[in-house]
Image: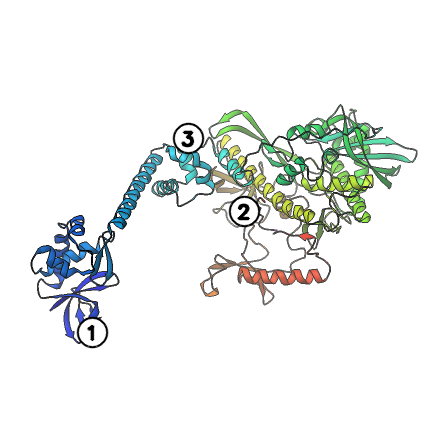
Amino acid sequence: MNLLFEEDGAFKTGTILTDNDASLQVETPHGKRLKLKSNHVLMRFAQPSAGDLLLRAEAEAEGLDTEFLWEVCGDDEFAFIDFAREYFGHEPSPVESAAVLLRLHAAPIYFHRKGRGRFRKAPAEILQAALAGLEKKKQQAAAIERMRDELLAGTLPEELRPLLRQLLYKPDRNRLETKALEAACAESGKSAAHLFLDCGALGSTHELHFDRFLFEYFPAGTGFPPVEPPAEPTDLPLAAVRAFSIDDAATTEIDDAFSITPTDAGWRIGIHIAAPGIGFGRDSALDAIARERLSTVYMPGNKITMLPEDIVARFTLGEGRDCPALSLYLDVSRDLIVTGHSSRVERVPVVANLRHHDIEPVFNETTLAEGGPDFPWKAELTLLWELATVLEAGRGKPAANQNQVDFNFSVDWSQTTADGPGRIEIGRRSRGSPLDKLVAELMIAANSTWGKALAEAGIPALYRAQTGGKVRMTTAAAPHEGLGVDCYAWSSSPLRRYVDLVNQWQLIAWVKGEAPAFPPKSPDLIAAMRDFELTYAAYAEFQRGMERYWCLRWLRQAGHPQMSARVLRESLVRLEEIPLIFKVPSMPTLPTGTRVQLAIDSTDLIDVDVRATYLETLAPGSGEPAPLDDELDAALPTDAAPPLGFESAGYALALIANPDDPPAAWHGRIVPGPDLPFDAVPGAALVRDGDAVTVASNDEAARLNDRIRDERTRAGIVDDTTTTTGSDIHSSAKRR
């Protein structure tokens, strides 16, 4: 005797070996034996064989009309054998009964299951709704297939056109358009960005990266809402000075200028900072704009200003104007010692905007040593450089980054290349020039002097502090060890940084003897600090990303030439001609600083990636190679410090690919120190046995960090109420 039964939602057949009241021993057509409960049996039969029943029943079921079965079926619950008997008008054969069962089971819209082998006809209204839903799904599937085919053919479906940004940067997987795009990506092996470029939906790869940033941080666009222009202050005294600024040619937000006035004891050195804080105050419409943006965004060939351009033009220190300014005057003796200082809110006559490209050829280390040619402002610049040298020595810190090179990116948007609008030029400029030192030291003097003045007056301010190697924003006037000053309050760039604007409001109140815009323990001040630090880091990361993109554009413009590079660590190199860092897997292990020749194999402007092949090791270039840390720190803020803040005696690092999994499931490798790969970042770390770092879990690491921070707080090193910190490795930001 054979039987039909149901197991795991499937119909199966077998031959009965033994039959008890509650269970049976059954052998399937494939020879498998199993124990089966009696209530799982749907039908017993002698013919055909167990192996033939379902095959014949499936063929028989093809001739059964589901809709007709539904129409002739009664409204009450029924067993399939009873319905087969009624349908055929005679005692059904096992094949006929099984065929009815298979057809009923395959039509859940028409027949609802009520148990093993039992069904009930779906009510008419429910059936109609289900059929309508089924038809809708068919139409949706057809639409998805059509849109997919259009994408594969290089045509952008009209349905996708208004959804491009969402599909690229934040897809909704419940939408048909997203499903069609994903299907096209899967079939073509291309990313969504590649497909949209093929369709002409994106003008260029630059548009892709720039628009992704705008989508996240400027969803409403980069335009400014209409605002009433601030009233020009009419009661400011006119300073009896001739001020001049020093900036790059492209600088429009001229924040600072200088002046020199001879005195009986020496000179009075004026440091004049543009003062938008005089024109508008806290809680104004312009404050809301600046508070939302928090900083100017810089990138090669473009920028997004913190303030509207007409407001910038009104307060920038442009030549030929009497400009509102917050001025710091340093009383300097003839032996270049600062003997006192004073601050004023005033109008400053700006008589010249000096530009680096004009001044540096005649004012540099060589011309200073040799006397150099005469040119306007030579005497003033020389005096300020001599003062800067004394100020630098007084800080006890050497000039920062003197062995490094700055790379200036210039985009000519009037030209178009094969990769889209814009032709890139990348120039080199050595840091630590006399002009660099001059400006840097006077800005440090202003920011540290004003920060100390606000602290002594009990007026809250926002400071940059560095203790134990970590740079952070804080409302406490803590030391900045990297600069060698007691405190450092960003105040010199109020046109392009919100922190500086906040500090300027506080300084103006201090100078005028008025109540500050942000009183002590102001929660708004702390919130602004935290938002600024996150956003500023995100903007900087975007700038670095766009510089990397334009480096690849430069390589493509040049036809992927062979390039010389220097080894940073392991397979990590940096090109010598442009600031591009990447890995070369084919390169042998070479000492840090080794010069190598590379073949640039390919560049990907969408993934912003480059592939290169090692060719040969080159002879050392002229001069000693810069230390490794200098090369790596070039991509960090100028006031950044090594992440540890202490000297390591050596270590080993376990790189774990899946640190949040149980330890038994970890996948990783051990990397001996100190040659840690530049991009090796464990998810979490725990010191074990004093000689190794092993990854435990992110939660465990977080608890360890909390314990460390608690101890630093109890020791008075950290004030949790006034300090916010971020990661040395990863930075992220979210608009608020």
Mark 2 secondary-structure assignment? strand
Question: Which is closer to the viewer, label 2 or label 3?
Answer: 3
Query: Which is the main secondary structure of the residues drawn in magenta?
Result: loop
Say which residue label 3 marks.
200
Q: Residue 572 got which mark? A: 2
Q: Quadrant of residue 196?
A: top left
Question: Which is closer to the viewer, label 2 or label 1?
Answer: 1
Residue extending farthest to the bottom is: 20
Q: Residue 281 got which mark? A: none
Mark 3 secondary-structure assignment? loop
Amino acid type, callout 2: Leu
Q: Position of residue 247 (x, y in %)?
A: 70, 31
Q: Position of residue 518 (x, y in %)?
A: 73, 45
Q: Position of residue 481 (x, y in %)?
A: 73, 51
Q: Position of residue 670 (x, y in %)?
A: 52, 59
Q: Residue at x 8, y 63 (%)?
A: 47
Magenta stretch in the rendered image: 726-733
Question: Which of pointers 3 and 1 lies earlier in the amino acid sequence?
Answer: 1
Query: Along the line of sight, which residue is nearer the eye, 371 or 299?
Result: 299
How much space separates mark 2 and mark 3, taking CA atoms? 36 Å
Q: Residues within 10 Å of mark 1 (few under 14, many from 20)?
A: some
For this view, does 65 lie left or right of residue 530? left
Query: Along the line of sight, which residue is nearer the eye, 158 or 148?
Result: 158
Does the image show residue 286? yes
